[in-house]
Image (cartoon, rainbow, N blue to C red):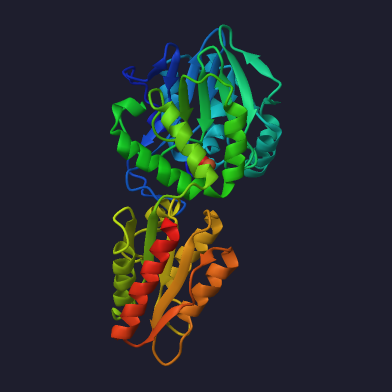
Amino acid sequence: MLEFRDDYLIHIDSIVNTEIVKDIDYVGFVDWNVRDFHSFDTFHGATYNSYLIQDEKTAVIDSVKTQYVSYQIRNIADKVPLDNVDYVVCNHAEPDHAGGIAALLEYLPKAQLLCNVKCKDILTDYFKGVVNKWNVRVVSPDDAVSLGKRTLRFINTPMVHWPESMFTYLPEEQLLFSMDAFGQHIATSGRFDDQQDLPEILRAAKSYYANIVTPYGKQVQAVLKAAADLPVKMIAPSHGVIWRTHQQKILELYQQWSAGVQSKKILVVYDSMWESTSMMAQSIFEGATSVSDELDVQMIHIRKNCLTDIAAEMLDAAGAVFGSPTLNMQMMPHLSSVLTYIKGLKFSPKAAFAFGSYGWSSGGAEQIDKWIDDIGWKKICQPVKCRFKPDTNILKLCFNEGVKLAQTILK
Ligand code: FEO
């Protein structure tokens, strides 16, 4: 655990523009500098959102990363005396939201921690020997915690994306605190979707879904079904902007992404040593693009693109081909990382095939071919291989397989 910085607790009495709705304020932290979030490339930063609800009773929704909890405590202290806070809700035990909870509870002497039973179990393992000293109330969807004019309700959302994941709902405001769901990794000064460039926010939301939520599409569908009857004016996730204008749009997109809906898109994903596999990739690309301008065909050299962006593009692709030269009888090591990552994310099955060059011993394209079989994607042809450098016949074969892939997708 990182050192707690109480020198950040300087009270400046000037934190403005935090109001979400009357008496509900943003008290989280905007992290402009984070660039790696457990291998998620956060080129545009991130936020760890927390909200303060002031009523007859006062509640804090979620905490932040350990190293920023001093800012969270300062933000709360700017609004209310710290010993007036009655509740802290923990919707999710992952350390970007719960890491700061131990320090937060130290500073909120009266606060009771509200979480579900699975969350309590996980927090017990994270904060060994400490949780039994906290005032914890285990809550369930049958509970209603009155704050006065407003009520906290709880919706368990298991595996979206951890077992203990939970939404908190404020019916009187029709406000859903949705934890990671509907989140985006992007740092902004404005807190709302209508204060930012919408395509940029939607791109960040898609990348977030692809890289964090994709394996749990069935669970997302179940949550969307359960939440369908809730009137929602505002969705306040634990990362990124709050949806107050485009909430229907993000709900529709979650419906599509979780159902595995694909667009007419093909990815040519490859690595190369001496340009032979690059030449093959180029011919596949040209074959696929020759079929129809309805298709979006993208060349992705894996050492010139990051895993995070590759996953975001893969989410709704209908076709994907993977190429690698053979190195030491294996595929190239970076492609191995890409395939491991894609396999874990459990994307909807794509039409696919393998290709690549080799020298005195093959193996790379065959490994990719086996990977396609293993994950159950729709293989449209045997691996396309060439020894050392592709000739006209090989490039023509690559072109033709690109055509076949495009035709398969357009059928
Ligand atoms: Fe943002 Fe799953 O933590």
Instruction: Assign the C terminus to one quadrant of the image.
Output: bottom left
Whether residue 296 is visible to the viewer of this picture, yes or no, is yes
Up-down relation of residue 75 to residue 157 (above or below): above
Q: Residue furthest toward the bottom?
A: 360
Picture quadrant where residue 153 is located? top right
Q: Nearer the viewer, residue 371 or 380?
A: 380
In depth, the one of 38 and 382 nearer the eye is 382
Instruction: Name the residue rendered at 55%, 55% in the picture.
Output: 346
Residue 135, image x, y percentages: 67, 25
Q: Position of residue 228 (x, y in %)?
A: 57, 26
Residue 230 at what x, y percent from top left?
57, 21
In this view of the protein, can residue 238 be seen by the observer? no
Q: How many marks?
A: 0
In this rendered view, identify the residue nearer to me: 180 or 295.
295
Left or right: where does residue 343 sit relative to residue 39?
right
Which percent across, then down, holds residue 160?
Answer: 58, 40
Q: Residue at x 57, y 39 (%)?
A: 220
Residue at x-position 40% and y-position 78%: 356
The residue at 30%/73% (across/down) is: 283
Q: Residue 104 versus residue 352: which sits nearer the camera?
A: 352
